[in-house]
Image (tube, rainbow, N blue to C red):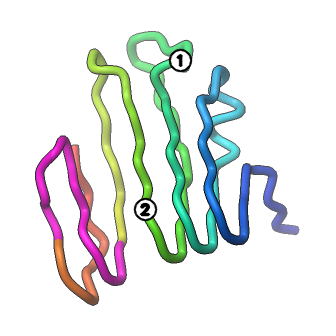
């Protein structure tokens, strides 16, 4: 049986700074609006792998990450723009799923 234990909002804004890996891995979902997830306070050790699901139906997602770690993002956008490390890497409509490191 599927269940959702993450932070969610039908419409509006989510601003969250998780302080545990458990909290972050529960995920974030916004139907329409904005999600800002700040991961700079996560207690990570070298080699830790953390998967954080983030879904936004329509709106904007910003993820802040510590500078001294490696990241992979699996991103799918129907219409809009993907910025990775301050650079536009996808724009348009009907974009496929892309992975960034």
Q: Is residue 21 above or below residue 9?
A: above
Is residue 56 located in the magenta-colored stretch of the structure? Answer: no
Find residue 74 and report its horizontal and vertical position in percent: 35, 57
Which of the two discs, 1 and 2, sits closer to the camera? 2
Residue 70 horizontal side relative to residue 7, left or right: left
Q: Is residue 21 above or below residue 11?
A: above
Find residue 7 and report its horizontal and vertical position in percent: 73, 50
Q: Residue at x 49, y 76 (%)?
A: 58
Instruction: Look at the image and give the residue range highlighted in magenta.
Output: 77-90
Q: Residue at x 41, y 42 (%)?
A: 63
Q: For residue 60, which numbered disc appears in the image? A: 2
Q: Residue at x 19, y 41 (%)?
A: 85
Q: Main secondary structure of the magenta part?
A: strand
Q: For residue 41, which numbered disc appears in the image? A: 1
Residue 22 lies in what quarter of the image? top right
- In the rendered structure, are the residues bearing label 1 and label 2 in contact, judged by CB atoms less than 8 Å apart? no
Is residue 89 located in the magenta-colored stretch of the structure? Answer: yes
The local secondary structure at tag 1 comes to loop
Residue 97 lies in what quarter of the image? bottom left
N-terminal of the pair, mark 1 or mark 2, is 1
The local secondary structure at tag 2 comes to strand
């Amino acid at each position: 049986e599927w269940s959702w234990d993450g932070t969610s909002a039908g419409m509006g804004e989510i601003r969250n700074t998780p302080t545990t890996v458990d909290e972050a891995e529960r995920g974030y979902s916004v139907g329409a609006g904005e999600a800002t997830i700040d991961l700079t306070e996560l207690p990570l050790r070298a080699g830790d792998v953390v998967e954080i699901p983030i879904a936004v139906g329509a709106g904007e997602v910003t993820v802040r990450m510590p500078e001294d770690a490696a990241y992979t993002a699996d991103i799918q956008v129907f219409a809009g723009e993907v910025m990775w490390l301050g650079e536009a890497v996808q724009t348009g409509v009907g974009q496929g799923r892309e992975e960034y490191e």
